[in-house]
Amino acid sequence: MGVTVNHRTFVIERDLPGSVAHAFRFWSDHQLKRRWTACHPDWQVMEDRFDFEIGGAERMTWRKPDGTEQAMRAHYLEIHPRERIVYAYTMLTAGKSISSSLVTVEFTGRGATTLMTFTEQAVFGDPRDGDIRESGTGIGFDRLCEEMAATPA
């Protein structure tokens, strides 16, 4: 029995309200990041670690209402303050990897706003998961825009 592999790359851009420094804070500050990345209010948080530094890790584990555990394990590879973040992460369901990704987030100042360019290169076991990931990531970035607009710089 072979393993299914589906490679996918997607790019999402958002014009964020505020300076590059303000935008970068929403990626580098634990509490600010959780305000826009928390997307399943019915999932119980089992683990939440955030070590935003080169070589640092971000770990989240949730329990879904059906009892299944979902986890995200990220490792920060590059951090260039107010310019770029590069990290690798794996998503797991019930302890089994469902995807692995390399992500680059770039920040470009545009006066009073910031262009954020998010590029994800991913490997999925199930090709349908790529559409779900891209859509969910976009929804998260919509929340990021809302949270940034509501938070003073």
Image: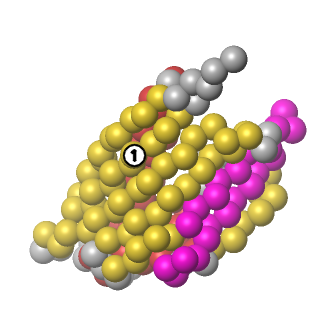
Pinpoint residue 93: horizontal percent, then vertical percent: 73, 40
Q: Residue furthest top?
A: 1
Q: Nearer the viewer, residue 13 or 96?
A: 96
Left or right, residue 63 beside residue 123 = right
Identify whether 40 is placed above or below 127.
below
> What residue is rendered at 74% in x and 55% in y?
61
Q: Which residue is mark 1?
A: 121
Residue 12 visible in the current orientation: yes
Left or right, residue 118 beside residue 25 = left
Pinpoint residue 47: horizontal percent, then vertical percent: 77, 63
Residue 135 visible in the current orientation: no
Q: Secondary structure at mark 1?
A: strand
> What residue is rendered at 63% in x and 46% in y?
91
Pinpoint residue 13: horizontal percent, then vertical percent: 26, 51
> What residue is rendered at 13% in x and 69% in y?
110
Q: Nearer the viewer, residue 77 or 142?
A: 77
Q: Nearer the viewer, residue 112 or 133?
A: 133
Q: Name the image quarter holding the C terminus.
A: bottom left
Pinpoint residue 82: horizontal percent, then vertical percent: 30, 79
In this picture the colour scheme is secondary structure
> What residue is rendered at 57% in x and 41% in y?
99
In the image, which residues are magenta?
53-75
Type of the residue with mark 1: Gln
